[in-house]
Amino acid sequence: QVQLQESGPGLVKPSETLSLTCTVSGGSISTYYWSWIRQPPGKGLEWIGYIYYSGNTNYNPSLKSRVTISLDTSKNQFSLRLSSVTAADTAVYYCTRVATGGSGWFYFDSWGQGTLVTVSS
Amino acid sequence: SYELTQPPSVSVSPGQTARITCSGDALPDLYAHWYQQKPGQAPLLVIYKDTARPSGIPERFSGSSSGTTVTLTISGVQAEDEAEYYCQSADSSGTYVVFGGGTKLTVL
């Protein structure tokens, strides 16, 4: 059974870049799509973007100008970078595996436990 | 931007049936999926592709679709089902992921 674990700084200063890594165990990062989702405290879920093992990416239009998702198949990891952060980016960040069959459907069948990132000086 | 609309809250007594709806103009053409989230925990997939149930999810969880509305039904609700439930689909172009705002299920 695949397991995902987020890691990275829990505190980031405004205007700096948030960087998180997700380590995948119990399965190969190849052959699947992988995604980041966030949840501000007390609020709902927001999809950030996903990456395919080939390197193809797709980002939420509202975040696209600030987001980069990449992967390292040698380490079975994928990463998130979010630039120019503000307090509005304070959230629990989840990494997930994506199930998709094309034709516009995607769902998230495995989730990391989530990591809280606070943006504050 | 495309939105999925859920009621903010639903309340039921133990043993009753809870129905949580999710509405969106593109739902007749796109699948919807449902997640359960308990406080302090990551979301858990409970229904995918409108009606399919992942292994390990109790049979009391079911999904249905009719026109622009999909429904998560929990039959014989138990206290442990109290949680936030989110629907998820894609936008009308099928390109971007969209979540509903979430529904808080309270078991009275």
Image: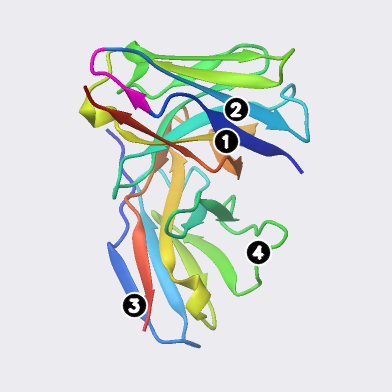
| Residue designated by label 3 | B11
* Chain letter of disc 3 in the image: B
Residue A14 magenta-drawn? yes
Residue at position x 34%, y 26% from top?
A11
The x, y position of residue B34, in whole percent, is 50, 54
> Which residue does the numbered mark 4 point to in the structure image?
B57
**As drawn, A82 above or below A34:** above
Location of residue A82 with respect to A87 vertically, above or below: above
Q: Quadrant of residue A107?
A: top right
Q: Amino acid under label 4?
A: Ile
- Identify the image quadrant of the N terminus of chain A: top right
What are the residue bounds of the magenta stretch? Answer: A11-15
Q: Amino acid at mark 3?
A: Ser
- Is residue B61 rendered to the left or right of residue B90? right
User: Are callouts 4 and 1 both on one chain?
Assistant: no
Q: Secondary structure at mark 3?
A: strand
Q: Is residue A56 visible?
A: yes
Q: Is residue A61 above or below residue A96?
A: above
Q: Residues within 10 Å of mark 2 (few under 14, many from 20)?
A: many
> Marks 3 and 1, how far apart in space?
30 Å
Residue at 50 percent across and 88 percent down: it is B15
| CA gap, disc 4 and disc 1 | 19 Å
Circles 2, 4 touching at the beta carbon (< 8 Å): no
Query: Residue B41 at what x, y percent from top left?
Result: 49, 53
* Labelled pair 1, 2 in contact (Cβ < 8 Å): yes
Q: From the viewer's perspective, tell me whether residue B74 is left or right of residue B68.
A: right
Residue type, numbered disc 2 = Trp
Q: Identify the residue under disc 1.
A: A96
Mark-to-mark CA distance, 1 and 2: 6 Å
Instruction: Kindly identify which residue carries mark 2.
Output: A34
A90 on left or right of B21: left
Report the Cα–Cα distance between label 2 and label 3: 35 Å
